Image (cartoon, rainbow, N blue to C red):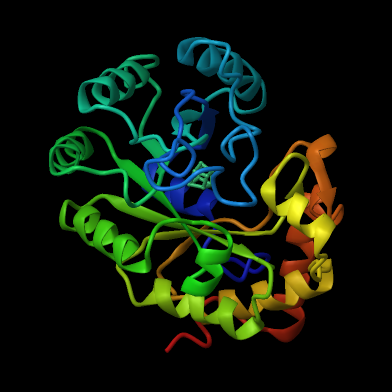
């Protein structure tokens, strides 16, 4: 950990692992989700945008190759020697027949010789034994990261946000992936309706108890055209302030297992779709406030890990 960041950053982790600058390229493979098509639920998680929480990923009207090339051109101007990790971000990117998934993943990996890994966001209930076996082999060829949505370990909150996936399913999936040596990143949201500070800290304890390598934390965004925003209009609930988000997130970081890499600490969204709150739009301010607080209190990731 360096003197500016009092926690494990993804940039440093990649630099150490790959000895080069690594840029992630977010892609949209235009999947759906079992929580949208009726297999597990309808309407999706209440906060989820119509783009399947992949609003800043590539344009699904373009082919994956085109999305990759467009983004690569932008990133190469900034980092001419960067290596790339394509990141399947929108919807559930293991929710398709195995042959279709193989074609997609292999196609992506053949796009560029500077691709050094593949990151796949999905749900814990979108795996089969055949898929686990295939991913195990793929991970031996090129490092994989599987990102799993947890949001909260409080199952009452999960019910309210219509997650339609149990903690037991999450644990089972993590264990399957780790048995195959595949890196796992858990995604959580702070400020979900009726969540207390104790709930948000408990979510960190839940993650610490599992063999998880990375975490993404961000604040709740109320987006246009979501079930959550509709219900907020009928029954408003408290919206987290920047100060509250920084305070709880710093507590979570100090509670987090020292080995876990923090992939993200701020929300991403399309400005015109964000109804409330507006402060997450200033991502740098959010990150700086977290850094400032940790430096002021002289605290580090893992200080309160138990
Ligand atoms: S599982 Fe992901 S894609 Fe599906 S509804 Fe929930 S947030 Fe959206």
Q: Nearer the viewer, residue 108 or 48?
A: 48
Q: Quadrant of the C terminus?
A: bottom left
Residue found at x 69% / y 68%: 191
Q: Nearer the viewer, residue 184 or 165?
A: 165
Locate residue 32, reporting x and y percent: 46, 31
> In the picture shown, does residue 101 fall above or below 17?
above
Q: Nearer the viewer, residue 18 or 48?
A: 48
Q: Quadrant of the N terminus?
A: bottom right
Residue found at x 65% / y 51%: 47
> In the picture shown, does residue 272 fall above or below 106?
below
Left or right for 43, reference 225: left
Locate residue 151, reporting x and y percent: 53, 61
Would you identify the image quadrant in which residue 172 lies? bottom left
Left or right for 128, reference 224: left
Image mark count = 0
Would you identify the image quadrant in which residue 295 lies? bottom right
> In the picture shown, does residue 94 fall above or below 184?
above
Left or right for 192, reference 162: right
Residue found at x 61% / y 71%: 6
Left or right for 235, reference 106: right
Q: Nearer the viewer, residue 33 or 131?
A: 33
> In the picture shown, does residue 111 fall above or below 246?
above
Residue found at x 74% / y 70%: 245
Locate residue 61, reporting x and y percent: 58, 12
Locate residue 184, reporting x and y percent: 35, 54
């Amino acid at each position: 950990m360096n003197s500016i960041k009092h926690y494990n950053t993804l940039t440093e982790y990649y630099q150490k692992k790959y000895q080069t600058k690594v840029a992630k390229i977010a892609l949209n493979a235009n999947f759906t989700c079992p929580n949208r098509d009726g297999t597990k639920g309808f309407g999706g998680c209440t906060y989820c945008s119509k783009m399947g929480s992949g609003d800043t990923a590539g344009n699904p009207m373009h082919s994956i190759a085109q999305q990759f090339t467009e983004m690569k051109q932008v990133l190469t101007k900034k980092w001419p020697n960067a290596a790339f990790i394509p990141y399947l971000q929108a919807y559930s990117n293991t929710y398709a027949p195995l042959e279709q998934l193989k074609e997609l993943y292999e196609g992506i990996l053949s796009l560029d010789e500077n691709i050094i890994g593949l990151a796949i966001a999905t749900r814990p209930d979108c795996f089969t034994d055949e898929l686990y076996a295939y991913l195990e082999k793929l991970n031996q060829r090129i490092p994989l990261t599987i990102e799993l949505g947890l949001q909260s370990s409080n199952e009452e909150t999960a019910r309210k946000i219509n997650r339609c996936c149990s903690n037991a399913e999450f644990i089972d999936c993590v264990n399957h992936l780790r048995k195959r040596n595949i890196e796992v990143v858990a995604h959580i949201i702070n400020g979900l309706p009726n969540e207390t500070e104790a709930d948000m800290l408990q979510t960190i304890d839940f993650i610490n108890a599992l063999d998880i390598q990375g975490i993404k934390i961000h604040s709740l965004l109320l987006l246009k055209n979501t079930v959550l925003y509709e219900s907020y209009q009928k029954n408003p609930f408290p919206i987290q302030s920047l100060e509250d988000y920084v305070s709880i997130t710093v507590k979570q970081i100090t509670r987090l297992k020292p080995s876990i890499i923090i992939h993200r600490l701020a929300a991403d969204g399309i400005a015109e779709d964000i109804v409330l709150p507006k402060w997450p739009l200033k991502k740098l301010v959010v990150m700086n406030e977290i850094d400032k607080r940790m430096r002021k209190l002289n605290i580090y990731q893992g200080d309160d890990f138990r």
